[in-house]
Amino acid sequence: MRDAESVLLRPVVSEKSYSLMEDGVYIFIVAPEATKIEVRQAVEQIFSVRVTKVNMLNRKGKRRRNRKSNTFGTRPDTKRATVTLHAGDRIDLFEKS
C-alpha cells in the first residue's frame, strides 16, 4: 500500500468534470502505476467518503508542433480515475474559505 497523496496527483478541472460533480462523480489524475483498489482507499482516506465505483483510463499525450524549429513533441501520458461516490457523499474540492 502506497501513501494516499502519492496515488492521487490532482483533480481534473474541466466543464465535463464540473457537470459530473453534481452526480457524485469525480475525476482525478492518478499515478501511472496506481490500481483501482489503491485509488479507492486513497479517496476514502483523504476525503472521508464512501466510494461506490472506480473506473480507470490511460490517455496518450497529444502530439504538439514547435513553431520555431518545426519539430514535434508530445504532452505527457496521463492516467485518470473516475470515482463514483455513495449517494449523499460529496467532496468539496474548491470550497470557499
Image (cartoon, grey):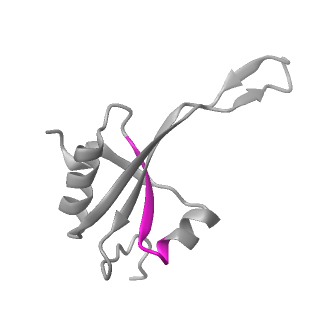
Percent across and percent down for residue 83 are 38, 59
Q: Nearer the viewer, residue 19 or 11?
A: 19
Up-down relation of residue 43 to residue 8 (above or below) = below
Q: Quadrant of residue 46?
A: bottom left
**Which SS type dominates the magenta stretch?**
strand
**Could you tell me how many numbered marks the image carries?**
0
Percent across and percent down for residue 40 are 25, 53
Q: Is residue 25 left or right of residue 38?
A: right
Q: Residue at x 44, y 67 (%)?
A: 25
Q: Residue at x 41, y 73 (%)?
A: 24
User: Which residue is the extreme one toward the left?
Assistant: 1
Query: What's drawn in magenta, residue-wise?
Result: 21-30
Percent across and percent down for residue 21 are 48, 72
Quadrant containing the C terminus is bottom left
Q: Nearer the viewer, residue 96 or 86?
A: 86
Quadrant containing the N terminus is top left
As for residue 58 lying within the magenta part, the answer is no
Q: Residue at x 60, y 61 (%)?
A: 14
Q: Is residue 72 left or right of residue 68?
A: left
As for residue 25 lying within the magenta part, the answer is yes
Up-down relation of residue 5 to residue 32 (above or below) = below
Percent across and percent down for residue 5 are 26, 49
Q: Nearer the viewer, residue 23 or 75?
A: 23
Q: Is residue 2 left or right of residue 55?
A: left
